[in-house]
Image: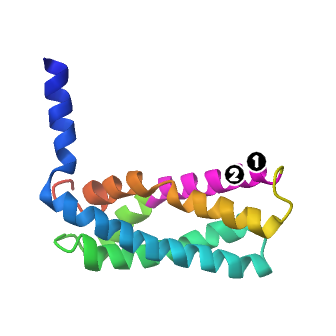
Amino acid sequence: MNNMLFFRKTGSIFKNTIIKKEFPLFILAGSIAALINVISRIILTIFLNFEISVFISYLIAMVTSFLLQRKYVFKSTKKSYKRSFAAFSLVNVFALIQVWGFSLLIKFWLINFIASVPLVEFIAHCFGVGIPAFTSYFGHKYITFGDKLR
C-alpha cells in the first residue's frame, strides 16, 4: 500500500500542468542550443582537436540555452540574470561532464566500427549532447530558475 502511494506521488510530477507546458519548450530550446553545439563543434574541429572543440562548443551552446530558457521556458522566475546564470552554470557543469564523457566514450567505441573519423565524431557528439536532457530540466527547474530554493 505504501509503495502504491509512493508511485502515485512521484508519477504525478509529470501530470503537473506547468511541467506539461514547460518540458516541451525546454526540449525545443535545448534542441536549438544542441544544434548550435554540434554546428560550432564541427567548425571548431577544423582548427582544434575533438576534445577541445566539444568543450568550447558546449560553452557556446550553454549561453544560448540560458538565454532561451530564461526568456521562453522559465519566464516566471524572479531571480536576477546574474544569480540565475550562476546557478545555470553550476547545473551545466554536471551536464558538461556528461556530454564530454559520453562523447569521448562513444567516439572511442565507434572508431572500432566506422572508419570515417568525422562521422564517428559527429555521431558521438550528437549522442553526448542528448544525454543530459532530463537531468538538466530538473536542475534548471528547481535550482537555476526555481524561486523557492534560495
Q: Is residue 101 magenta?
A: yes
Cβ atoms under marks 2 and 1 closer than 8 Å:
yes
Q: Which residue is mark 1?
A: 109
Where residue 139 appears, as percent x and y from the top left, is 34, 54
Dot 1 lies on which element?
A: helix
How is colour applied across the structure in the image?
Answer: rainbow
Q: Is residue 29 above or below residue 91?
A: below
Residue range (magenta): 92-111
Disc 1 marks a residue whose amino acid type is Trp
User: Dividing the image into 4 quarters, which one contains the C terminus?
Assistant: bottom left
The picture quadrant where one finds residue 2 is top left
Dot 2 lies on which element?
A: helix
The picture quadrant where one finds residue 121 is bottom right
Task: Please tell me the numbered disc located at residue 149.
Answer: none
Q: Is residue 50 magenta?
A: no
Q: In this rendering, would 103 be left or right of 88?
A: right
Q: In this rendering, would 30 be left or right of 42?
A: left
Q: Is residue 21 above or below residue 45?
A: above
- Residue at the far right in the pictured view: 115
Calculate the distance from the C-alpha at mark 2 to the C-alpha at mark 1: 5 Å
Q: Which residue is mark 2?
A: 106
